[in-house]
Amino acid sequence: MKATATAPANIAFIKYWGNKPGNLPYSDTISMNLSNCITTTTVEWDSKLKRDTLNLDGINLSGPKLERVVKHLDKIRKVLGISICAKVISKNSFLQGAGIASSASGFAALTLAAARAAGGKLSEKRLSRLARLGSGSASRSIPDGFVIWQKGSDKTSYAESIYPPDWWDLRDVIIIVTRKEKAVGSADGHKIAHTSPIFKKRVNQNLPRRTAAILKALKNKDIELLGKTIEEEALELHEVARTSTPPIEYLLEETKRIIGKLIPQWRKEGIPVYFTLDAGPNVHAILPGKYEKQLLSKIKKELPGVELIINKPGEGARLSRSHLF
Ligand code: PMV
């Protein structure tokens, strides 16, 4: 009764911000899986255990982090029709809580490993719906490559692959501005997003327009259309957060310098690089793979010593034979 799964984090081109019960988004969202931000999770269901246990990156967790996982395991138990407890060990290939969606890779890997460890063979749709209940963006870490997550009801809101990872050789170079864990988690941000005065217009007008633009950009591999649209979208996410009640400010001065000065400057110097952001201060620099070297030499010059995570479009959640225990 043991299984191991790997799952990637993903970067959203169209963001999920604000939700309804069951982590249902107000609009469709689109993302790319990240090849170098991977969570590996082993789950063992064991009738001798009195409670669920979770070890993440070598630390036995308790409190709210454990409770969130236990709650998710409860939902999985319900779907699979089992009532025993689980031992969960999980490892991230990257840092958590700094705007890199470790909850997406974490809940996607947990869902696949837990279902498989109980002998369940759930469809990709079912796994995506179930992962969504742990963290909305985790629904998008189940399918491969470039992914769309449909809004809808509990039964119809799941993610599907639009294109495989090798469709477009893009890079997401994550520039780590800080390793500090963010003060307001996305779960709290979602709850108050609707209080922003710009939320309604965002959902009714801006997002349908941007979603169509991103689909067109992906289809035609049009970096300029993709880039302009993701920058607009990222800035609006932060405007919603900033104008919510209470307001949330995720960006640091260094973030603003990179997105406001350096990236536009690198673009002028001939590199088609554009930014996007998650709910955190780190910058995701998106560009075609053939410009990677040029970008890295600019970063080395302007941001010496900065930590980077270089990602290609990645596959979705997978089972693995190498267990963590
Ligand atoms: O899945 P959550 O609750 O961690 O929300 C993710 C929110 C953003 O990363 C800001 C946007 C997104 O769509 O991934």
Image (cartoon, rainbow, N blue to C red):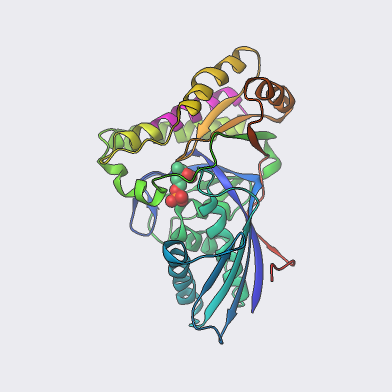
Residue 193, percent from left and from top:
31, 43
The residue lying toward the viewer, choosing from 63 and 195, is: 63
Residue 29, percent from left and from top:
46, 43
Is-magenta flag for residue 121?
no
The residue lying toward the viewer, choosing from 16 and 226, is: 16
Tell me: residue 202, above or below residue 56.
above
Residue shown at 44%/64% (left/top)? 68
Range of the magenta residues? 221-236
Residue 314 visible (yes or no): yes
Is-magenta flag for residue 226?
yes
Q: Quadrant of the C terminus?
A: bottom right
Q: Residue furthest top?
A: 268
Q: Is residue 23 left or right of residue 289?
A: left
Residue shown at 61%/24% (left/top)? 273
Q: Is residue 71 left or right of residue 160?
A: left
Q: Quadrant of residue 194?
A: top left
Tell me: residue 139, above or below residue 268.
below
How many badges with numbers are in the image?
A: 0
Residue shown at 63%/50% (left/top)? 144
Q: Quadrant of residue 304?
A: top right
- Magenta span: predominant SS is helix
The residue lying toward the viewer, choosing from 213 and 2, is: 2
Tell me: residue 277, above or below residue 33.
above
Residue 32, percent from left and from top:
59, 42
Q: Quadrant of the N terminus?
A: bottom right
Tell me: residue 6, above or below residue 279.
below
Residue 281, percent from left and from top:
48, 35
The residue lying toward the viewer, choosing from 286 and 102, is: 102
Residue 121 visible (yes or no): no
Residue shown at 69%/67% (left/top)? 324
